[in-house]
Image (tube, rainbow, N blue to C red):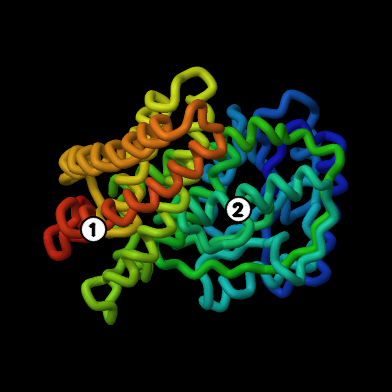
Amino acid sequence: MVPVFNEEKDLGPCVRSLHEHLSRTFPYAFRVTVADNASTDRTPLVAARLAEELAEVRSVRLEQKGRGRALRAVWSASDAPVLAYMDVDLSTDLNALLPLVAPLISGHSDLAIGSRLARSSRVVRGAKREFVSRAYNLVLRGSLQARFSDAQCGFKAIRRDVAAVLLPLVEDSGWFFDTELLVLAERAGLRIHEVPVDWVDDPDSTVDIVRTAVDDLKGVWRVGRALASGSLPLDRLARPFGDDPRDRELTGVPNGLARQLVGFCVVGVLSTLFYLLLYSGFRAFAGPQPANALALLVAAVGNTAANRRLTFGVRGRGGAVRHQAQGLVVFGIGLALTSGSLAALNAATDNPSHTTELAVLIAANLAATVLRFLLFRAWVFPTGATDPRDGR
């Protein structure tokens, strides 16, 4: 499948090159579907002419834009055992197409993606796109625990039986569609095969990088919130395909202490950085005490939510309000420690520097962090008192 929007100039050469490559090298039957996303130029006419000229080519017209919408529509209606798509500019070398679909045909894997970030990939593109791509994938790894390396490469394939289960659960109809599909697939325990690709950036690409990045981050927030709240039907996904090892309770660690310490430290480091950024921002228009209290409050809410899900394995909405209330009590203790430290600093030194304030706050937060872990483990999320699968 080739999704297109206003590509009257490149569509003909692209489809002919793809058709020639498949006819010459592909050992399986194939069909090329041009999915027109509400183009306003001559793209529909070019697609129709290609369908008349080449027996293995057909065209589909959609009256609304959206790459995800096009993929859902065409893949849902297809009877092919393996479904694939690529960008119309053929930025990805077509020699990677057979390695992309072969593991799906053999039954070894359930989805396959081209990766521009694999070590053996050869990629030519500008610094801005390189930075955006790597930053986005780091965000996915940090926020959604994604293990696939390249979410947005326009070169992917999926088995039809897998698509039939996953597609109805994907909400996005735009560029985030790929990421959401892959995250759901990982959570369902599916095998995602990655193929290193040779990729050359299209300098004439009409993709709005800023708008796409903003929409993607909104999608990350939506999916992350759904995973944290347990509103995604992971049980429904797990039944046909098996489960994700990350959704199982870990064994072999006494009381889970080591795992909890690691999770708490990771969340604590990120929360501390978030807190210091907030404090620096609030300090620009407020005194040290109000800035500290407000920054600590915002960071504490996020810290409790992150520790609830990532450190202590509590899912679903059951008990979430109580946990946040208890977390605010812990926050109050931390506030007393940090505020007391600031008060002591101001009593000992007239007009301390901003750097000194931050140093004192870091030391106070380290002490508060140790106490926070002990309170979380013994009171807020006591071992054995919560079901890690609660709310699923």
106 w.r.t. 34: above or below: below
29 w.r.t. 42: above or below: below
Point out the frontmost of discs 2 and 1. Answer: 1
Determine whether, in the image, residue 292 is placed left or right of residue 197: left
Q: Quadrant of residue 310?
A: bottom left
Residue 295 location in percent, x, y? 41, 32
From this viewpoint, is residue 29 visible? yes
Q: Which residue is mark 1?
A: 374
Q: Do the CB atoms of the residues marked 2 and 1 lie less than 8 Å apart?
A: no
- CA distance separating discs 2 and 1: 33 Å
201 w.r.t. 353: above or below: below
- Residue at left 50%, top 18%? 285
| Residue at the extreme bottom | 252
Dot 2: element: helix
Residue 150 location in percent, x, y? 63, 57
Q: Quadrant of residue 149?
A: bottom right
Q: Quadrant of residue 112?
A: bottom right
- Residue at left 80%, top 52%? 90
Dot 1: element: helix
How would you rate the neighbour count of disc 1 (Cα within 10 Å): few for under 14, some for 14-19, many for 20 or more? few
Residue 67 location in percent, x, y? 61, 40
Sequence-earlier tag: 2 or 1: 2
| Residue at the extreme left | 385
Q: Which residue is mark 2?
A: 137
Q: Amino acid at mark 1?
A: Leu
From this viewpoint, is residue 52 visible? no
How would you rate the neighbour count of disc 2 (Cα within 10 Å): few for under 14, some for 14-19, many for 20 or more? many
Q: Amino acid at mark 2?
A: Asn
Front in this rendered view, residue 283 or 96? 283
The numbered mark at residue 94 is none
Front in this rendered view, residue 355 or 112? 355
- Residue at left 63%, top 35%? 212
